[in-house]
Image: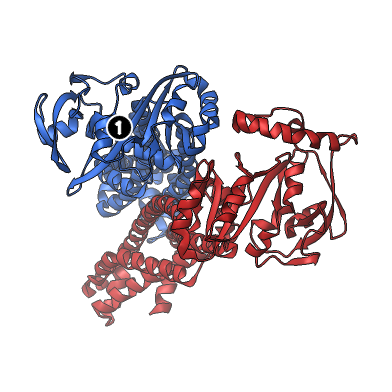
Chain colours: A red, B blue
Amino acid sequence: MLRLALRNLVRRPVRTGLALLGLAMAVAVLACLSAFGTGYRRALHQEIDRMGVQLMLVPIGCPYDAAARVLKGNALEHSLPQSALAAVRDDSAVAVAAPLLIVAAPRPAEKRADLWVGLDASARELKPWWRVQAGAAWFPDANSVILGAEAAIVEMRAPGDKLFCPEVFPELRSGVSAEHRALGPGIQERRRSAETPLRDSEIGPPEMGRTFRVAGVLERSGTSDDNLFFVPLATAQEMFHQPSRLTAIAIRLRDPTLAPEATERLQAIPGAQVVTLTEMIGTFLNLVGSVRTLVQAIASLAIAVSGLGLFNTLLATVLNRAAEFAVLRAVGASRAQVFVLITVESLLLAGVGSGLGLALALGTGGLLESAVKRFVPFAPLESLVALTWPVVFQCLALGAVVGLAAGLYPAWQASRAQPATALKLTT
Amino acid sequence: MTWLRLAFKEWRRRPVRTGVTAAGVAIAVAALFSLLAFLRGYGQGVRREVERLGAHVLVAPKGCPYDAASLALHGASWPCYLKMRFLDEIRVAPGIAAVAPVFMSALHTSAGHQTVYVGVDTNLLLLKKTWMIDGAFPLQRDELLVGAAVARRLGWRVGERVSLPGLATNTATVRGLLRPTHGADDEFIFLRLADAQRLFRHPDEMTHVLIRLHDPNQMDRVVMQLRGCDAGMYLSVIPLAHLLRSIQTLVNSTRVLLACVALVAWLAAGAGVSNTLLMAVAERAREIGVMRALGAARGDIFRLLWVETLQVCLAGGVAGVLLAFAGAHTVETWLRTHLPFAPSDALVQWHWGLAAACLGCAVALGSAAGFVPAWRAAQLSPREAMRSPENVL
């Protein structure tokens, strides 16, 4: 039966191909979507778990936006005063509080920005997976840098090599910049006075900047850390002229269940707000979910359209082959057998279509991923499109349902062929 | 005309097939139309809603500005409160035309209905220039200004003594009725700020502050000033125009994704049309052969088949647009439950330009899908075609 159905389909390659094309594309989109959903959720949880952080203290602004930027290693527009760190560490529920200063250093020549992250020793406790591939595991002195795996390749540096970082914000060295103004007059005053000694000590060589010695290179972690330049916190504050400013404070609690009370206390720190990471995941998933639902709705319409195409193809085939069915019936095939033959044909068509669609999804998944990463608010660096077995089965099952639905009426039509017509037609 | 009639007759010969093909096109067109209408309606709705609020800057407790804006626009209970003393610092900032403190709280009174109480003072009138009030603005203790929708629902009249929904032990006098604004204000009950603070037991607190500027172009400067002041450490200062822009950016960025998926639906529909037509050509090979033998030129055959395709696609397109129009309400309800920030205006709006564009797309689809089958039919040599028993393709 299967072979017969297959041979019938191969008989009209163009027709079969066109019917398959529509279905394959629709299934591919749906598969990518489902895969994306699962992949995104998994990658997000994984990234958060890996950080071992329950709360994050960020400057006032949209907390979700801020937390997402920090997680991805992006620079923030606003910053926290260092005094907030002491306040956080004083809190009884806080086990580890790691200050971070993340600055994007523009490299106009290469048309990209390097991300420099200032850390202090407490960060090591938050990053248990912090493993060096080569060199020292921590900064031996103020002028040492530890590179992410990707950054080391881009910069072509190994431990012991020298790395020169040019002065990136020359305008910050002398007077008021746009960012200063953004921070308000009070902060601006404080900042300017703190900067003065720095300026005196650093002006000298014609090309301003700072030379680092590469202390170590990190193992590839599959996260945003791979692209970062890590330096001691104080060095980062100095080289980017952000004395006693922090981008964020990552907080691990003694007990995760203490989060609500701790959040309330920490929220009182002026100029700062607390983001709970579990809450944040929820918001992201909601936001991404709503877009996904929208896309999914249109994708199901595409499946419906391709189902109609399938139906049409089968119906036309059945009409064309009326004589054939009449002969089949005349030589002893039962109605049920003819019905099953057409149903098998349609299922086969749908199955091959879905299979092609899945293959297409696998092929274009990477392309889709890079497109989607630009749109989602917080995209983990790991693969988002996870074509798991449940997704595959789901798509195949859907294809089968579409095939079955599209094949029923044509199969019924075919099974109605009268054996007597066979005699008429052959003459 | 003969061309059209001839093509039309052909489609009538196979009503099921034609119907199904047109239905495929209709679904694709309906999806596209709904999508475009939604993207348009969403952008407009958000903009109009912010315009109706009358404020340029929103000052709210710390938190996500999107949440805060949504609360302020649609009316809800706020999770945090601001101290009244911040108001003095806000007032002194330069470039500010009006500062209206608001205390907003929502009570669930009956199933599905929530009553939003908004405590305001006369400063609000400086922001809501378009308001038309029958009666007067509440100035005395226990006086109300009632939104049009609430007044209609509860049957309240000016001067009536009413008991407050959700706060049954309290009564108040309706001093004014707000004429319909077609916005969220219609659903609000306005009362004096002091009364609201007393009723909800938050003396000396407010939920947000609406600020109108002399010159909206000075926005950045004023926002910086507000963020820089001492109270700024406890506030989130939200420039609504920027918020609007970022929502727009968010929607725009999903647009590409949605368009790609819609394109797939179109390709599926196109493949369906093409396939149907190829089958039709195969079935009618003999007929086409007769036509050619009778003197029809290749161009004629091509034209005949092309007109057939266009007819089906156009019919499908019209049906699709009508379908989208008829289903707009359902689509909208569905969208509202799935979107994080939905303006209260109609999301899916009818627009002639969009309808025309969708029909244009349907015609383009028909032309593209019909090209190969029509060309193939035109290439048939009359002799071969007449000889072919059933099928040459």
Q: Nearer the viewer, residue A250 or A343?
A: A250
Point out residue A314 in the picture as x, y percentages from the top left corner. Answer: 34, 63
Residue visible at 77% across and 67% down in the picture: A133
Q: Image quarter for residue B143?
A: top left
Q: Does residue A77 appear left or right of residue A38 in this picture?
A: right
Q: Amino acid at mark 1?
A: Met
Q: Image quarter for residue A188?
A: top right
Vertical placement of residue A373 versus A314, above or below? above
Point out residue B83 in the picture as x, y percentages from the top left corner. Answer: 40, 36
Residue with the mark numbered 1: B1
The mark total stands at 1
Label 1 residue SS: loop
Vertical placement of residue A362 versus B307, above or below? below
Graded by Cα atoms within 10 Å as few (under 14), some (14 to 19) or many (20 or more), the crowding at tag 1 reads few
Point out residue A32 in the picture as x, y percentages from the top left corner. Answer: 49, 59
Placement of the N terminus of chain A among the 4 image quadrants: bottom left
Q: Image quarter for residue A26?
A: bottom left
Point out residue A243 in the picture as x, y percentages from the top left corner. Answer: 71, 41
Q: Is residue A331 visible?
A: yes
Q: Nearer the viewer, residue B318 or A124?
A: A124
Q: Chain of mark 1?
A: B
Q: Does residue B118 appear left or right of residue B161 in this picture?
A: right
Vertical placement of residue A343 versus A88, above or below? below
Check the image and name the residue furthest to the bottom. A332
Q: Nearer the viewer, residue A129 or A323?
A: A129
Residue visible at 9% across and 30% down in the picture: B161
Q: Is residue A427 visible?
A: no
Vertical placement of residue B280 versus A62, above or below? below
Placement of the C terminus of chain A among the 4 image quadrants: bottom left
